[in-house]
């Protein structure tokens, strides 16, 4: 067959400034099964794009292994749409945000993306609990006691009263991602103290965001999960103020950056 003549168009195409109006970058663990799926369901739209990069992580989940991710944060952020601005960057590890520190995570990410707001699961959870007016909280984590203890210290240092703290004792985040939704609901009910104001379910690997509304109906109290809190924060920082009660009480509230 004869090669056809190739013709250059008479003019260059017009370009939008961005394919989508807002950009959310995710820095997730190499082993993460959950965050991208949750953010595609709760955050991504024809207005908000979600763009992910993965950074090295090795199980088991221990304070030492979590802290070892810190040197990868700046390079990971730089890989998300290189040389293009992002509106928000979210680091998707709750327990690592505790042991590294919210401020240190923010500084590492902003070294690559200085224009972006930075969201961590811990800081987003705190803002969510504050928005809900919760002072006395119950906490459910999938971690060992060793890994959970710094998280208890984190919330206590910020003035929360912990009514009950329940750990499931897992040390592999891939197993955490396989806890069934029914089991999440069952453990959430067990972990909720009668006199608490709200329940926080930690870990971005745990598929809790999809069952928050059901847990709230079962316990009669508001529930904040790691991925629900970060999705809420990212949406609000991108100017999406729509109330979505089907996702839980938190998704009906406004967000204050500080």
Image: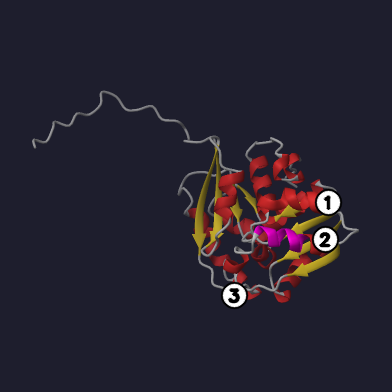
- For the residues marked 3 and 2, what is the alpha-carbon distance in whole angstroms? 27 Å
- For the residues marked 3 and 1, what is the alpha-carbon distance in whole angstroms? 32 Å
Badge 1: residue crowd in 10 Å (few <14, some 14–19, many ≥20): some
Mark 1 and 2 residues: CB-CB less than 8 Å, in contact?
yes
Mark 3 and 1 residues: CB-CB less than 8 Å, in contact?
no
Precedes in sequence: disc 3 or disc 1? 3
Q: Position of residue 12 (x, y in %)?
A: 32, 27
Q: Report the residue that reaches farthest toward the right.
A: 195
Q: Report the residue that reaches farthest toward the top.
A: 10
- Range of magenta residues: 181-188
Q: Position of residue 37 (x, y in %)?
A: 56, 51
Tell me how the rendering is colored: secondary structure
Task: Report which residue position mark 3 lands on.
Answer: 60
Residue drawn at point x = 81 percent, y = 50 percent: 130
Precedes in sequence: disc 3 or disc 2? 3
Instruction: Please tell me the numbered disc located at residue 221.
Output: 1
Precedes in sequence: disc 1 or disc 2? 2
Residue drawn at point x = 19 percent, y = 29 percent: 7
| Quarter of the figure with residue 251 | top right
> What secondary structure do most residues of the magenta stretch adopt?
helix
Badge 2: residue crowd in 10 Å (few <14, some 14–19, many ≥20): many
Q: Report the residue that reaches farthest toward the left.
A: 2
Instruction: Please tell me the numbered disc located at residue 187.
Output: none
Say what secondary structure mark 3 lies in: loop
Q: Mark 3 vs mark 2: give the one in front.
A: 2
| Whether residue 111 is visible | no
Instruction: Reply above or below: 149 against 139.
Output: below
Residue drawn at point x = 77 percent, y = 44 percent: 249
Task: Report which residue position mark 2 lands on.
Answer: 192
């Amino acid at each position: 067959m004869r090669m056809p003549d190739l013709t250059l168009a008479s003019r260059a195409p017009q370009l939008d400034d961005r394919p989508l109006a807002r950009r959310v970058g995710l820095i997730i663990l190499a082993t993460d099964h959950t965050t991208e799926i949750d953010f595609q369901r709760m955050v991504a739209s024809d207005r908000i794009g979600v763009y992910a990069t993965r950074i090295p992580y090795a199980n088991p989940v221990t304070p030492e292994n979590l802290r070892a991710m810190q040197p990868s944060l700046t390079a990971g952020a730089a890989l998300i749409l290189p040389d293009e601005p992002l509106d928000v960057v979210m680091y998707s590890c709750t327990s690592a945000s505790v042991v590294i520190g919210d401020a240190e995570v923010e500084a590492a990410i902003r070294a690559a993306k200085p224009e972006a707001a930075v969201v961590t699961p811990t800081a987003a959870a705190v803002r969510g609990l504050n928005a809900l007016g919760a002072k006395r909280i119950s906490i459910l984590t999938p971690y060992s006691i060793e890994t959970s203890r710094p998280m208890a210290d984190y919330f206590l240092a910020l003035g929360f009263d912990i009514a009950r703290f329940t750990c499931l004792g897992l040390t592999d985040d891939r197993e955490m991602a396989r806890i069934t939704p029914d089991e999440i609901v069952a453990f959430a009910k067990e972990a909720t103290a009668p006199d608490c104001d709200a329940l926080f379910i930690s870990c971005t690997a745990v598929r809790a965001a999809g069952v928050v509304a059901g847990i709230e109906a079962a316990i009669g109290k508001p529930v904040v999960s790691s991925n629900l809190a970060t999705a809420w924060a990212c949406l609000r920082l991108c100017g999406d103020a729509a109330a979505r009660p089907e996702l839980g009480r938190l998704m009906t509230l406004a967000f204050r950056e500080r």
